[in-house]
Image (cartoon, grey):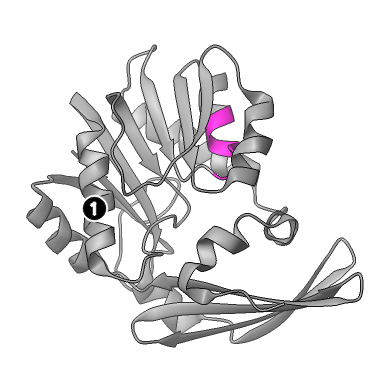
Amino acid sequence: MQKDSASWYSCWFDTPYYHILYKERNDAEAHLFMDNLTHYLNLPEEAKILDLACGKGRHSIYLNQLGYEVTGADLSVNSIAIASQHANEKLHFKVHDMRLPFDEKYDAVFNLFTSFGYFENDEDNFKTLSSIKQSLNEYGFAVIDFLNADYVIPNLVPEEVKTVDGIDFHIKRYVKDKHIYKEIDFEDKGEKFHYTEKVQALALSDFEAMMEKAGIYLLDVFGDYKLRKFYKKESERLIMIFK
């Protein structure tokens, strides 16, 4: 089964296989990141946080456990349905396109785990940045946690097979037209599947240019989830704090 790569994120993220392939994601690491981030931002105890492109809500749920009022938003209907099982008075989930601003204003907007750069054109990236800015209140901060292309590209694993829940996922990675691709092939219940992940290989300088255009102030940049200094060739992550 071939899915249209032009809107790969709307189909792949909505399948159960996406969640199977990435089920081993490290919750301890995610919790450490949220602890470090909320401490660094010195958010008020009752802060309202928007988790933009929240997936099944693992960051949202933990932020809510820390005492914050959290809204998790994602384009994937299935992911929001799963996340909503954890909803409560201070934890809400909704289907939302991150290119569109929210009516409500937040103390913090988080866009985590490389949930940016999926679109085909730069204008959609700019719309996303602008909508994040518009969704912040006067004192709010925003965070984008993106891959560091200058580290990731030289260290790409071209091919591997990952077996999860009895399914062999055949994965190929490559760079083409300033995008990082991941081709995923597997077979389940007698049917063959093919999906493509595709993210723009945006560097810090690309974000800086977009932020300047959007009237956004980049306040700090970190290179990992422990919020250590960013090194262009060595850091695995590109974590940007702005308002």
Q: Quadrant of residue 199?
A: bottom left
Q: Residue at x 53, y 21 (%)?
A: 91
**Residue 30 horizontal side relative to residue 119, left or right:** right
In this view, the residue in front, 93 or 34, is: 93
Q: Is residue 199 above or below residue 61?
A: below
Out of 198 and 44, give the one closest to the viewer.
198
Residue 29 position within the rendered picture, expressed as x and y whole percent measured from the top left: 58, 45
Q: Is residue 104 left or right of residue 93?
A: left
11, 56: nearer the viewer: 11
Q: Residues within 10 Å of mark 1 (few under 14, many from 20)?
A: some
Q: Secondary structure at mark 1?
A: helix
Residue 56 in view here: no
Q: Residue 73: percent from the left, percent from the top?
A: 47, 37
Total label count?
1
Q: Is residue 44 magenta?
A: no
Mark 1 belongs to which amino acid?
Lys
At x 8% / y 47%, what residue is drawn? 215
Q: What residue did someone put label 1 on?
A: 127
Which residue shows up at 31% across the image and 32% down it? 102
- Quadrant occupied by the N terminus: bottom right
**For residue 60: magenta?**
yes
Q: In the shown orientation, is residue 74 left or right of residue 46?
A: right
Question: What segment is highlighted magenta in the picture?
Answer: 55-61
